[in-house]
């Protein structure tokens, strides 16, 4: 155990997770690479949990942060804040929500917490519909709508949460159905559920489940849900903390794969927009955002420094078509990984979109999740010079790959080759 690891253990909660048998201290990064305290260089396919979305040490972002910090670091939302207004204008215009209002927070957890406050206040109901296998954050309210027991430390809740089928396509009671039949069965389940409950405030859903292992329903499921929700006056909250800003390649927002019946009432975002700076936020149509009848502010949400970073990062992302790069390079990477997976009896499925890819591992000859194999591959990939993540429902047996969206084809090939070697260590 390193000296820093011992110090960490002495002052940190037991439940504060660390990756690797010998935890890694990352000291600096550049582009798609990071270095540890011992000087080892790694290709980064996890980006600080999908947060370093564009590149490490992106000059445009570091320059914007430095220049803003030299002027003023903090003022709070009690004062006019030009970078915050400018970023809010751009986010509102990109959101697809008419008459959009934007409120900035410091994290995705806080963004989802705010969305729940808005929805329950607007609807005068504390009943929330959530997806099985979901994850929405670490706060008391966000934990209470998380459908993944590995990340839900208490059953106590300020909300009544009802879980809906549909977030996982290839497991569960509807996995054997065609896409059309799957959607119809999930809609019927939702209709039946609503027939047994009081009026719900909202359905909250990740278009692609992040912690759940990058699972997703067939395109159009949430559009079909929307028809049911509209009849009941129930709001749709799209949790875009991991899927927003073009990571899926095919769409700028994950909800757009389900947008046939219009945009969500509320969108939450965080992670990648700050490229490592602490930015989260909520977008909602004005009627919903303005429903609170008490004062509210944010001390750190909308900080001038983080807003400057977000503006520079968003500009870079759009000007360099990183969504298109995610589509092109991610498509090649997924196909390469599927070929690798086909040669391994440990790989059940390679799934995902753009640069949001999951590799589900099972015990050979079974459909049983294999978290030990996932942990072993995580270690072997690190030894080979590649950092990845893991997740998944029931058991953490999915390898999660989410590189910066500026990933090049040679880097994608390099990462795939390291993963192939890591999978071969399973025997």
Image (tube, rainbow, N blue to C red):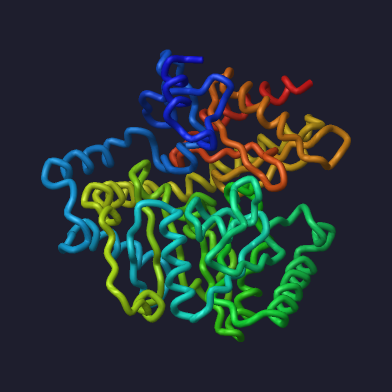
Q: Nearer the viewer, residue 197 or 270?
A: 197
- Asked if residue 319 shows in the view, the reply is no
Q: What residue is at 45 percent from the left and 79 percent from the top?
A: 122
- Asked if residue 386 shows in the view, the reply is yes
Task: Count every numbered label the image shows and give the total.
Answer: 0
Relative vertical location of residue 307 with respect to residue 364 in this rendering, above or below: below
Residue 126 screen position, x and y as percent? 54, 74
Residue 415 screen position, x and y as percent? 57, 28
Q: Nearer the viewer, residue 423 or 13?
A: 13
Residue 120 screen position, x and y as percent? 48, 74
Q: Residue furthest right?
A: 365
Q: Nearer the viewer, residue 258 or 46?
A: 46
Relative vertical location of residue 340 with respect to residue 349 in this rendering, above or below: above
Q: What residue is at 59 percent from the left and 49 percent from the top?
A: 153
Q: What residue is at 29 percent from the left and 68 percent from the top?
A: 296
Q: Quadrant of residue 336?
A: top right
Q: Residue furthest left?
A: 71
Relative vertical location of residue 28 with respect to residue 15 in this rendering, above or below: above
The C terminus lies in quadrant: top right
Q: Quadrant of residue 206?
A: bottom right
Q: Residue furthest bottom?
A: 231
Residue 101 screen position, x and y as percent? 34, 71
Q: What residue is at 47 percent from the left and 15 percent from the top?
A: 2
**245 left or right of 201?**
left
């Amino acid at each position: 155990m390193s000296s820093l690891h011992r110090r960490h253990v002495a002052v940190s909660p037991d439940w504060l997770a660390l990756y690797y048998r010998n935890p890694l201290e990352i000291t600096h990064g550049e582009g798609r690479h990071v270095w540890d305290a011992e000087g080892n260089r790694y290709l980064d396919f996890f980006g600080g949990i999908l947060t370093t979305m564009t590149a490490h040490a992106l000059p445009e972002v570091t320059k914007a942060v430095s220049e803003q910090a030299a002027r003023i670091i903090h003022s709070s939302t009690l004062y006019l804040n030009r970078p915050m207004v400018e970023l809010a204008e751009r986010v509102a215009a990109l959101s697809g929500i008419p008459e959009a209002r934007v409120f900035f927070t410091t994290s995705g957890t806080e963004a989802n917490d705010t969305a729940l406050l808005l929805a329950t206040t607007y609807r005068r109901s504390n009943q929330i519909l959530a997806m099985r296998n979901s994850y929405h954050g670490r706060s008391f309210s966000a934990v209470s709508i998380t459908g993944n027991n590995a990340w839900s430390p208490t059953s106590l809740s300020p909300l009544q949460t009802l879980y809906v089928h549909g977030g996982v396509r290839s497991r569960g009671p509807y996995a054997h159905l065609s896409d059309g039949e799957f959607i119809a069965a999930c809609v019927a389940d939702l209709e039946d559920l609503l027939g047994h409950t009081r009026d719900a405030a909202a359905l909250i859903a990740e278009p692609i489940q992040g912690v759940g292992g990058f699972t997703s329903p067939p395109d159009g499921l949430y559009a079909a849900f929307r028809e049911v929700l509209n009849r009941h006056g129930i709001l749709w909250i799209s949790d875009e903390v991991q899927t927003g800003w073009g990571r899926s390649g095919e769409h700028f927002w994950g909800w757009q794969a389900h947008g046939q019946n219009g945009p969500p009432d509320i969108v939450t975002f965080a992670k990648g927009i700050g490229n490592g700076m602490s930015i989260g936020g909520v977008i909602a149509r004005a009627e919903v955002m303005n429903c609170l009848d008490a004062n509210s502010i944010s001390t750190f949400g909308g900080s001038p420094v983080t807003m400057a970073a977000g503006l520079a990062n968003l500009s870079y992302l759009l000007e360099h078509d990183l969504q298109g790069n995610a589509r092109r390079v991610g498509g090649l990477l997924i196909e390469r990984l599927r070929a690798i997976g086909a040669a391994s009896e440990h790989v059940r499925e390679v799934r995902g979109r753009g640069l949001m890819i999951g590799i589900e591992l099972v015990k050979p000859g079974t459909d049983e999740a294999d978290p030990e194999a996932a942990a072993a591959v995580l270690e072997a990939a690190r030894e080979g010079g590649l950092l990845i993540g893991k997740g998944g429902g029931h058991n953490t047996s999915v390898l999660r790959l989410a590189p910066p969206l500026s990933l090049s084809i040679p880097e994608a090939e390099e990462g795939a080759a390291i993963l192939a070697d890591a999978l071969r260590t399973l025997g």
